[in-house]
Amino acid sequence: MPARVPLPRRLLLPLAALLLAVAAGGLYLFEPWRAFTSTTVDEAAPVAAPPAPTARATPAASAPSVSASAVPGVPVTGSDRPGGGFVAGEHPTSGTARLIRLADGSAVLRLEDLRTSEGPDVRVYLSTRPAAESWLDTLGPGALELGPLKGNQGNQNYAVPPGTDLTAFRSAVIWCHRFSVGFGAADLPRG
């Protein structure tokens, strides 16, 4: 059995400092405690713009009535289209994503019943690629960041910058910026 050669004392301190720096870097990059945590967000759905009138009302037909668009806090149809379901990427991801156009002309991306993993530096994007492609390894050209993911579970809203041409985007993507991987993506309604 070969004899063990002890490390010289002058190497112990630099080696310990190197190991500590590597461990700190690993903790910073991977944030392993996020595997055991969860953040739930439950934001109310914004009120969509009422559908544009299709026919001119006659005086006899203009009697007051209550519709869904007149009830505060109730989303209406029209610019509020059904959402697309998430396709899992690097992490199991489920829920739906939909675009809601508001009465003032602005738009919101709404994530509903979202379930995904927590991770370091996870953000929400609109991508020009369909969901089946956008989560692979790139968001595609012209991707638009809407902000950091508010929580890995629940219902949440992300404002779309004014003047954005929504017809250019095909999917919503949950993306880990630090490691350039998609957690999941959902196709957005077309038309």
Image (cartoon, rainbow, N blue to C red):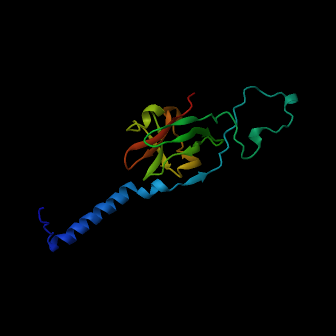
Q: In the figure, is residue 165 to the left or right of 155? A: left
Residue 86: x %, y % from top left: 52, 37
Residue 118: x %, y % from top left: 48, 51
**Residue at 55% over, 35% down:** 85
Is 176 located above or below residue 22 in the figure?
above
Is 124 located above or below residue 52 in the figure?
below
Q: In the figure, is residue 50 to the left or right of 161? A: right
Give the farthest residue toward the bottom: 9
Q: In the figure, is residue 143 to the left or right of 79? A: left
Give the farthest residue toward the front: 1
The answer to whether residue 165 is seen in the rendering is no
Is 138 located above or below residue 6 in the figure?
above
The answer to whether residue 12 is seen in the rendering is yes
Residue 10: x %, y % from top left: 15, 73
Give the farthest residue toward the top: 55
Q: Quadrant of the C terminus?
A: top right
Q: Quadrant of the N terminus?
A: bottom left
**Residue at 43% over, 38% down:** 135
32 and 101: which is toward the camera: 32
**Residue at 69% over, 34% down:** 77
6 and 154: which is toward the camera: 6
Numbered marks: total: 0
149 and 58: which is toward the camera: 149
103 and 159: which is toward the camera: 159
Quadrant assignment, res 190: top right
Is 21 located above or below residue 112 in the figure?
below
Residue 180: x %, y % from top left: 37, 44
